[in-house]
Image (cartoon, grey):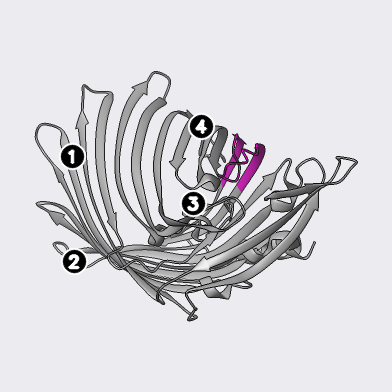
Amino acid sequence: MRNKKHFILFIIIIAMTCIMISDSFSQVGLNINFWTVADGNTFRNYENLADVIYQPNITIFYDHSGSKGGTRLLYEGSAFLFNEFTTRQYHYHNLGITGNRSMGESGPVLLWGIRGGKRYNKDEYKYYDYKHAQGYMNLRFDGNGIWVLGTQVRFQDYEELSQFSFWETQGFIRGSFFLKTRTTIIGRMQAGFKKFTESLISEEIILEMVGGGMHGKSNGHSQSNNQSGNERTWTRVVQVESSQDGVFQWIGSLRLAQSIGVKTGLAIEGTIQRNPKGGGRVLSGQDSGYETNDILFDDPYSYDSDKISLELTQMLPWNTQLKLGAESSLKRYDRPVYDLEGSPLEGLLRRDTLQTGWISLRKTIPLKGFVKGLIVFLYYNYINNDSNDGYFNYANRMTGLGCNFSL
């Protein structure tokens, strides 16, 4: 109840602020997204537990523009509402400000932003709770192609798993080139350094949780069943491994996109990711927190990878866009394989081959008046993660239906 009050208070504060400072050069807006996802393997592990997740998202913003640039103040709130695994429900809230400014007629364009927020989980999974803040600054140069130089600083603080709190600094350069053959080439080089805020011995048990529920209201390693068969009890032992307090990473990617006719496009992209000295921290036997690049489940700083993807885009009648895609990646971890009881298997390092395929439809419906437009989405995604670590050896199918509209 307390978190709902915070959510409503955030909206009231932002809305009142937008009204008070609005003028003829400003605009107040509202974006609403809503997704319904049928997820065949909700927590990305061998247990294959399915669920339906409702994902509402709201963004309230105030835009102010001038002759040389503009500024946006925004509030964003999202919730992830699990139909079956109700104890896993969570929501997060962000406040931020972004801007752009032209540095002269022939000069670059400066893009910048600062935001911060917090994730809230139910008591059973409060160890996923964190506060975060980040800021970025990019310079865009238009001329012989488009060049972007950028940097980002990020801080993430876990309230219960303080061993995973960190600072991250990234820098990148990206070049985009447009050829007369209607070919687009995009190359990117990125370097990052992640510094943990606490030192840690090479291995320690940091958390033990016991949870139970009926008919899948919780999830984890099934350890025992009572005689009635109605209740299951799980014991989860979470381990962390680390060889150092910081880890360096570099990523290089190259994307080639080709127009095939007026309404068809084909793109291929390759990405190489390396952590030269290793040193990432990982939780063994931990399931996904159901967010992109989940730090606790599969931190990108904990593995090297080689990835290639292919995507076809086709414009259809009635303002409809079709996308077909496939991706394959080989992920090499500097951590041992564990059995399902959490014991390491000597002499084996974890290796995953991740393959995905997807199809999506996006239809834009023009509207007049107070609602600026409506976009409807439909997608299907197949994932197969072939791992020599049994816990992470899984397949998954996801079907999603969503909509977006702006006021």
Whole-number angstrom distance, CA of label 3 to CA of label 1: 27 Å
Helix, strand or loop for disc 2: loop
Q: Is residue 302 above or below residue 339?
A: below
Mark 4 vs mark 3: give the one in front.
3
Mark seen at residue 292: 3
The residue at which mark 1 appears reads as: 184
Name the residue type under label 2.
Gly
Name the residue type under label 4.
Phe
Mark 3 vs mark 2: give the one in front.
3
- Tell whether 133 sits left or right of 332: right
Relative image position of residue 395 (x, y in whole percent): 52, 35
Residue 36 colored in magenta in the image = yes
Q: Is residue 48 above or below residue 283?
A: above
Quick one: quadrant of the N terminus? bottom right
**Residue in view at x 35 percent, y 36 percent:** 327
Q: Earlier in the sequence, mark 4 or mark 2?
A: 2
For the residues bearing labels 1 and 4, Cβ distance under 8 angstroms: no
Magenta extent: 32-56
**Residue in view at x 80 percent, y 40 percent:** 215
Q: Is residue 407 above or below residue 396?
A: below
Whole-number angstrom distance, CA of label 3 to CA of label 2: 37 Å
Mark 3 vs mark 1: give the one in front.
3
Q: In this view, does 189 lie above or below 213?
A: below
The residue at which mark 2 appears reads as: 104
Whole-number angstrom distance, CA of label 4 to CA of label 3: 19 Å
Residue pushed farthest front?
Answer: 346
